[in-house]
Image (spheres, helix red, strand yellow):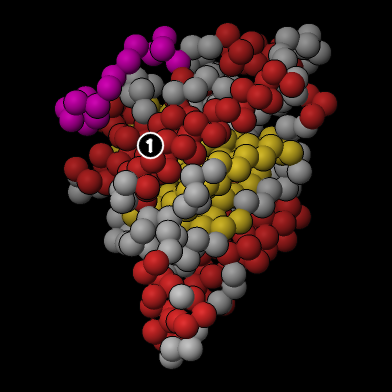
């Protein structure tokens, strides 16, 4: 059948091919940092891989049923927020004051609508709160108590701040506090060092070719004074537009903000005609790396082309296509 189709005019062949193929793709990340085999036990690696696969399969199930890229992104990120392995939601790191302050954002590539929350401490799934800001308010960003009151008024799941407490993250804070006093901390942590670059995110394209991106984080261990990173800032840690790409970043937030990383990648694709891979590599390796801005991104276009570059030691990442088979990577 395909041999006969190729005899038809090229434009008609293209239309048939587009209509007949599943172009829905989901890409996720679980943060970047000093992630090497030397710092990872086989058991821990298996847990991370399983968690990434769970996120990918959950998001893919949405796309496979004809769901939107927004639904897939929110679903995939929620899975990672609920897993204490990652620095988002349940696994969020602690601030200097011993609190968990969460940030998240989401963006609709079709309409460029966006929503985000920053510095929240009682919302179980900040990514859902960010979407609520986008769809249920006239604003783009809400912070702190105001965002929490808004989420509560809409019936989003609210939890006691103790829900976010994990022993692993608490020990990480104690280690940083000891360093501040000029002392050498004991080796209290097992596993990779993610105190700076832990974030989760997802980008997706659905059957209609619509893009979406979402990012969620607990920020940096020992952060002070209400610090907010790039994750809830549209154009820095998150960006999506159908005409270019969907991007979610993970890294040293101050650099991602100053270099407007997510939008810069989109602009290179849109205005310079660069491929997703070339644009992402340009920003991550040729702009961020020389400035000592560590981290990485996942980027995806409406045709399903994607890239997952990073300049740190490792990045939890994965993708899934129409066949429903998850592909996961951690190291360089």
**Residue found at x 71% / y 14%:** 189
The answer to whether 150 appears left or right of 251 in the picture is left
> Which span of residues is magenta-colored?
150-164
Front-lying residue, 48 or 190: 48
Q: Who's the residue at 78% across and 32% down the image?
A: 36
Q: Position of residue 208 (x, y in %)?
A: 33, 62
Question: Residue 143 appears in which quarter of the rendering?
Answer: top left
Instruction: Please determine whether, in this image, residue 131 is positioned above or below residue 54.
Output: below
Q: Is residue 48 left or right of residue 180?
A: left
Secondary structure at badge 1 equals helix
* Residue 132 rendering spot, x and y as whole percentages: 25, 39
Residue holding disc 1: 75
Above or below: residue 291 compared with residue 61: below
Q: Residue at x 61, y 13 (%)?
A: 168
Residue at 38% across / 63% down in the picture?
A: 209
Quadrant of the rendered structure where residue 171 is? top right
Where is residue 14 drawn, in percent x and y?
44, 79
Is residue 51 shown to the viewer in this render? yes
């Amino acid at each position: 059948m395909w041999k006969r189709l190729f005899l038809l005019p090229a434009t008609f062949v293209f239309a048939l091919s587009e209509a007949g193929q599943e172009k829905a793709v989901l890409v996720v990340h679980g943060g970047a940092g000093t992630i090497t085999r030397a710092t990872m036990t086989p058991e821990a690696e298996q847990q991370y891989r399983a968690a990434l696969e769970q996120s990918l399969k959950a998001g893919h199930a949405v796309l496979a049923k004809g769901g939107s890229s927004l639904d897939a992104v929110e679903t995939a990120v929620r899975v990672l927020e609920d897993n204490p392995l990652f620095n988002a939601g349940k696994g969020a790191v602690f601030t200097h004051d011993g609190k968990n302050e969460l940030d998240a954002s989401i963006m609709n590539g079709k309409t460029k609508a966006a929503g985000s929350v920053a510095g929240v401490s009682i919302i179980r799934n900040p990514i859902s709160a960010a979407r609520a800001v986008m769809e249920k308010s006239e604003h783009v960003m809400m912070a702190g108590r105001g965002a929490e009151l808004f989420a509560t008024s809409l019936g989003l799941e609210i939890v006691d701040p103790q829900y976010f407490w994990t022993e692993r993250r608490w020990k990480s804070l104690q280690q940083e506090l000891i360093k501040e006093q000029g002392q050498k901390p004991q080796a209290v942590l097992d596993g990779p060092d993610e105190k700076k670059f832990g974030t989760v995110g997802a980008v997706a394209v659905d059957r209609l070719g619509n893009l979406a991106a979402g990012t969620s984080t607990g920020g940096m261990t020992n952060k002070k004074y209400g610090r907010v990173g790039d994750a809830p800032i549209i154009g820095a840690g998150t960006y999506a537009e159908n005409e270019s790409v969907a991007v979610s970043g993970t890294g040293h937030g101050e650099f991602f903000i100053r270099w407007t990383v997510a939008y810069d990648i989109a602009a290179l694709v849109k205005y310079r005609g660069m491929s997703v891979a070339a644009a992402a590599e340009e920003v991550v390796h040729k702009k961020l790396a020389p400035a000592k801005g560590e981290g990485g991104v996942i980027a995806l276009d409406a045709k399903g082309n994607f890239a997952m570059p990073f300049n740190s030691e490792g990045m939890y990442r994965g993708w899934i296509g129409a066949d429903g088979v998850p592909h996961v990577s951690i190291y360089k």
